[in-house]
Amino acid sequence: MINKLVSKIRKTQAPIVVGLDPMLKYVPEHIQKKSYAEYGETLEGAGEAIFQFNKEIVDHVYDLIPAVKPQIAMYEQFGIPGLIAFKRTVDYCKEKDLVVIGDIKRGDIGSTSEAYAVGHLGKARVGSHSFYGFDEDFVTVNPYLGSDNVKPFLKVCKEENKGMFILVKTSNPSSGEIQDRLVRTGNPAGGQGAEGGISFEDRPLYELVGEQVEAWSREHMGEEYSYIGSVVGATYPEMGKILRDIMPKSYILVPGYGAQGGKGADLVHFFNEDGLGAIVNSSRGIIAAYQQESYAAFGPEGFGEASRAAVLDMKKDIGQALEKKR
């Protein structure tokens, strides 16, 4: 699946993933009214509204982008009807030949981690039959429980030729409370030190996680890049530069563009010299574009067109930044 993602990025010249994170406050009133008329002001009505919202956005942008990233929490809040909308969204995006990244951020161990991996990437065994559950192409994974969490996902990824993006340095402001913590590490090759003849250095935790992702990435390689990528926020470009060097063959999923403050100029270090190696996410900056002053002229009825315009502007911004890098 990483080969398909790279191919589609080359074809579209748009290293962009649209985050389908449909809070009801983003869904125009006319969409909500139509859904409530059919299902009432119920969880079922909410599920229908967010699916129809997603569908219209996808219809307007699928030819411009390689991938989408539905965030499962936005669907889970509506219970079972929300999860049905999530599955319908995944299936519809695949009909449009988009790569689907399930933003699930799972982190557990043993049989629980195995169940998450099977449910989102693999096939569940039922009697003599096997069935895909949600069937995304990639998922996001929290690595802070170590290999006990990651290995079950890696196993299913290998079986299904699918992939995952592992959280390394996230875009939120408080990420540094844990991810930037300095860890003292031994460096036998670094010369003599005060403790047992070993040189020690203090390094941020996110660098050490990046090195572990690099090790995992070598276990499941595609033609050019690994099926195992990382998540590094656009809001930390200098850290992105360091992590790009640590993980040369891992695709970096970059959240934080647009609404969280990231701009094209901040992103150049996330890419390799071949112009590949990263894919940039924008969620509400695209799906709620019609609510922004820049795209207000489209109005609620034209929210799909507003999303298309936002994608084109994002593509131009990133393209100009990468051209300057070259």
Image (cartoon, rainbow, N blue to C red):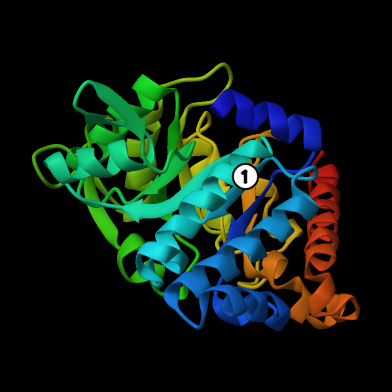
Q: Label 1 crowding class (10 Å Cα cut-off): few <14, some 14-19, many 20+?
A: many
Quarter of the rendering containing residue 323: top right
Q: Nearer the viewer, residue 272 or 188?
A: 272
Locate residue 324, reporting x and y percent: 85, 47
Relative to residue 65, is residue 248 drawn left or right?
left
Q: Residue at x 48, y 26 (%)?
A: 226
Quarter of the rendering containing residue 132: top left
Relative height, residue 277 to residue 316 (above, below):
above
Can residue 301 be seen here? The reply is: yes
Relative to residue 134, is residue 278 drawn left or right?
right
Locate residue 171, reporting x and y percent: 50, 64
Q: Residue at x 32, y 45 (%)?
A: 208
Relative height, residue 77 to residue 264 (above, below):
below
Relative height, residue 278 to residue 83 (above, below):
above
Tag 1 residue: 93
Can residue 219 be seen here? The reply is: no
Q: Nearer the viewer, residue 283 or 192?
A: 283
Q: Residue furthest right?
A: 297
Secondary structure under tag 1 reads: helix
Q: Residue furthest front?
A: 38
Q: Nearer the viewer, residue 179 or 103?
A: 103
Locate residue 270, reporting x and y percent: 61, 46
Q: Residue furthest left?
A: 196
**What's under tag 1, amino acid-wise?**
Cys
Q: Residue at x 46, y 68 (%)?
A: 74
Relative to residue 236, is residue 207 drawn left or right?
left
Q: Residue at x 55, y 28 (%)?
A: 2
Quarter of the rendering containing residue 202: bottom left
Locate residue 101, reporting x and y percent: 51, 45
Relative to residue 119, is residue 94 drawn left or right?
right
Look at the image and tell me in which quarter the C terminus lies: top right
Q: Nearer the viewer, residue 256 or 140?
A: 140
